[in-house]
Image (cartoon, rainbow, N blue to C red):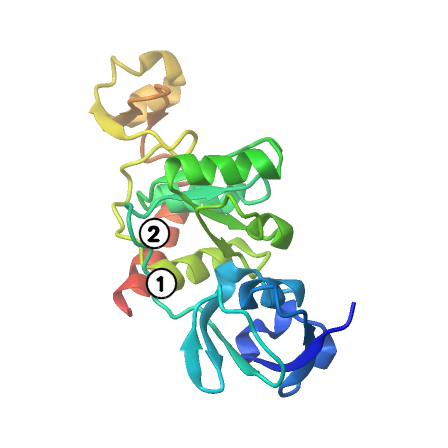
Amino acid sequence: MNGSEIHVDFAPELHLFVPQPHRAGAAPALVDGVSTLGHVVESLGVPLTEVGALLVDGREVPVSYVPGAGDRVTVRPVERPQRVPGAPLRFLLDVHLGTLARRLRLLGVDTAYESTDIGDPALAARSAAERRVLLSRDRGLLRRRELWAGAYIYSTRPDEQLRDVLDRFRPEPAPWTRCTACNGLLRPATKDEVADQLEHGTQRSYDVFAQCRECGRAYWKGAHHEQLEAVVERALAELSRG
């Protein structure tokens, strides 16, 4: 197919996604006079979830803009903090982000998580149905049209993943209010109410408990509480710097 040439300049933050020739200055790309600029950008490897302003010859245009011969395009990253309009900030994480899901829930952030691989179409459909921001390292998943909103997770390390999500979305924290297993809300509970989940030593040593309203799981300040407290304190410090 014959095409016209445009030049596309990607911000350094987006170089991870684009082939080497498109990383140094404004690289040429062919357009057909029909495809939108959003389609062109994605065809060069960048999910639109990671794209902020699109400029053509210095003028901001929508993703639906159809580029023509000679256009010089600048692709900027998403501005931070990113605001998600039209719904409370809620997340959906794919099967590979279990640790991140538990840490977001530890902070009281509404976080759905699929512990099994239900497939890209089902994940994107759930994102749309529940109006949740889908977090994933799967670039193809983030390019699905039915997705309501999404964001790429840049790191494989849970500490860095959490820091990045907090920096990008600035969620409102409410530590110790959600079940890390199912995302349900916690309520105060008596020792008698959760006795069937307690070992004898736990019954002797602890008196303050919480229980998930959804799955019934019991919580108390056990052996790992200091580690979890450190995760929460670092996260709150990160958010306070915003």
Q: Position of residue 170 (x, y in %)?
A: 32, 59
Q: Amino acid at mark 1?
A: Gln
Instruction: Give the label on residue 63, or none.
Output: none
Of the 4 image quadrants, the one containing the C terminus is bottom left
Q: Nearer the viewer, residue 26 or 154?
A: 26
Q: Which residue is mark 2?
A: 232
Q: Amino acid at mark 2?
A: Val
Q: From the viewer's perspective, is 132 left or right of 213? A: right
Query: From mark 2 to mark 1, how far is it between C-alphas?
Result: 22 Å
Task: Name above or below for residue 124 compared with residue 189.
Answer: below
Q: Nearer the viewer, residue 127 or 201?
A: 127
State which tag comes first along the sequence, 2 or 1.
1
Q: From the viewer's perspective, is 130 left or right of 121? A: left
Name the residue at 54% across, 64% down. 38
Q: Nearer the viewer, residue 132 or 146?
A: 146
Q: Position of residue 12 (x, y in %)?
A: 56, 79
Please, what secondary structure does the residue beneath circle 1 have?
loop
Quarter of the image where one finds residue 129? top left
Q: Which residue is mark 1?
A: 82
Name the residue at 53% across, 57% down. 152
Name the residue at 73% across, 80% down. 21
Q: Position of residue 209 (x, y in %)?
A: 26, 27
Name the residue at 60% across, 56% down. 156
